[in-house]
Every structure is written in C-alpha cells, then in structure tokens.
Image (tube, coloured by chain):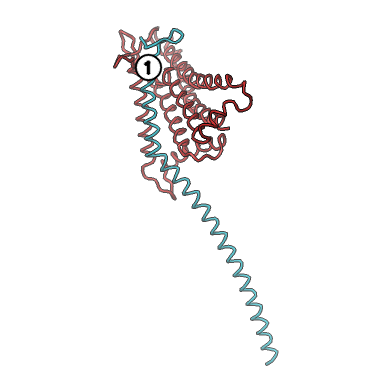
Amino acid sequence: MDHGRPMVEWFGITFDLSIILTSTTAAVLVVLLAFFLTRNMDPDKPTKLQNVIEWIVEFVQNISDNIIGKTKMPFIASFGVCLLLYIFIANLLGLPATISTTDTHVVWWKSPTADPHVTLTLAVMVMGFSHYYDVKTNGVKNYLAGNFRPYKFLFPFKLMEQFSGTLTLGLRLFGAIYAGEVLIMLLTSSVSSGIFPAVAASVPLFIWLAFKLFISGLQAYIFVVLTMVYVSVRLH
Amino acid sequence: MGDFFIFGLPVSIGTILYQLVIFSILVFVMHKLFIKKVVEMLNGRRDRVVEQIASTEKFKQEAREKLLEQEELLEEAKIAASNIRKKS
C-alpha cells in the first residue's frame, strides 16, 4: 500500500500540497472557533459559548500556573491555547476521511499531524519559545551561564537533553496519529475483500474511531503540558 | 522526492517553512484578537470579586459598630427614663 504525496517545486524547494491544504484548514477552523466563542462577551453574566472559551483559557492557565508558577507573560496562555486547539483539530481532521486519487494513490486529505514534518516543526517552535522565554526573563548572560549551572561537565548532556526533548515531543504526536491512520486504512480496506470481512471489521473500526477521538485530545493535552514543563525547566 | 535525506527518508523544506509561517500567524492572530480579551476579562472579574468581598466585609463591620452604638444609646435612654420615673 504505497501512498504518495502531492509534491510541487516552487523556487527550488519542495512543498507538500496536501499538508498545506490540511494545516491551513486546521488553522482557519481554530480562528473561526475562537471568533464564534468570543462574539458577545459579557464580563458579569457569561453566556454559554463564553463559558467554553473561558474554560479553555483557564485550563491552560491552570497548567502553566502549576508547572511554571505565576508568570508575567500573558503570551504563554495564548501559545498554550493555540497549541491545544490546533493540535486537537488537526488530529481530528483525519478521522472522517482519507481522500486519495484512485490510479496514482496520491493522498490528498489526512491529518497534518500524521506527518513528521509538521509535528517536528511544532516541537522545534516549542523549544525555540522556551529559549526565548528564558532569555526574556533572565537575560542573555544568565541564559548562557545557565547551561553550565550545576556542574560544568554536564554541558553536553544539557545539549543532548534539548535535542532529544524536541525529537520525542514531535515524534510522540506523529507516532500516535500516524498509527491511528494506518489502522483506519487497514480496517476500511477490508471492504475490498467481500462483504463478510467488511461486516466483521466494522465493530473494531467503531471502537478504533472512538479510541482515536480520545487519543487526539490526550495527545494535544500532553503536548501542552510538556511545553510548560520544558519552559519551566529552562527557567530554573 | 524531497530536498535532502535524513537516514534515507526524504525531507521537504517547503512544508517545514509553511508550517512555521502558518502557525506563527495563527498564534499572533489568536493572541491579538481573542485571547487577550478573554484574559483581561478574567483578571478584571477576579479583581472585581475581590473588591466586592472586601467592601462587603467593611460594610458588615460598620453595621456591627452601629449596632453596638445603638444598644448603648438604648441603655442610656432606659436609665434616663427610669430616673425620670423615680423623680416624679
């Protein structure tokens, strides 16, 4: 089952069109969701939709307060909320369908997070954000000196820690969602082997779809928590 | 298929760049347009609740003091009334 990707070349660099399509869709959906949830906000009498957005923001603020402590940068709440919503919606995009052309088997619609490019880019952005936060709070000198803080010979280990942390953060998300998609494709391809295997495969398919829904939310939550943990490790 | 190969797997730089750009735009748009409003509203509500509780405490304290004053005045009035009755 070899599935290709639609690649084009602009200005000498290769782009993957299906990822451009699906990640833009996920981003637009996040903005639309936020827009509809914050439309008529009343500070004293919260409406139902306003409660939802308040719950989301307070949830992320709770996580950051518990792990980092009171912080003076309100940007961390929006970064966390963005990550949570974007990853959750991106994970859910591959759930209804995986669209591919019939003769060349080129996949056009799948979760953007089922691609290692996307998840590793997100992980690198999170790491970059934690470094930026460290420089902003402690200053450049402290940031550079903090690398040698407990013992000098631990410096290569600290480098490895940054590198491997980024890798695990990105690959964890990629592995969970990609495995879900592979299994969905496997179960749905049983349709081509006749009606009895198709009916027999429908029960595990439903169970797997429900599980994937749960996993989407869980992976988004884990990503946000680990973001906060990396930022707090950098700060202390 | 890709730009360069890491461990034999193709890596396309364009996808990475695009994802960087679109996620940064998303974070800035969310921060400026929506989340700032919500955070300010939550903080404003918390400050207002704290202020209301503090002023309620203050009013209760004043009410208690006034009650004590009233009772003292009542005692004095009773004593004055019994004095007047004794004289007459």
Q: Is residue A149 above or below residue B36?
A: above
**Is label 1 in a helix, a strand or a loop?**
helix
What is chain B's hue in the picture? cyan
In this orientation, which residue lies closer to the viewer: B82 or A78? A78
Q: Is residue B47 above or below residue A146?
A: below
**Which residue extends farthest left?**
A10
Quadrant of image for the N terminus of chain A:
top left
What residue sits right under mark 1 in the picture? B13
**Which residue extends farthest right?**
B86
User: Dot 1 falls on which chain?
Assistant: B
Residue at 38 percent of width and 22 percent of height: A96
Residue at 32 percent of width and 18 percent of height: A17
In this orientation, which residue lies closer to the viewer: A201 or A99? A99
Instruction: Describe residue A103's horizontal placement relative to residue A55 as left or right.
Output: left
**Which residue extends farthest bottom?**
B88
Q: Amino acid at mark 1?
A: Ile
What is chain A's hue in the picture? red
**The quadrant where residue B25 appears:** top left
Residue B77 position, x and y percent, is 64, 81
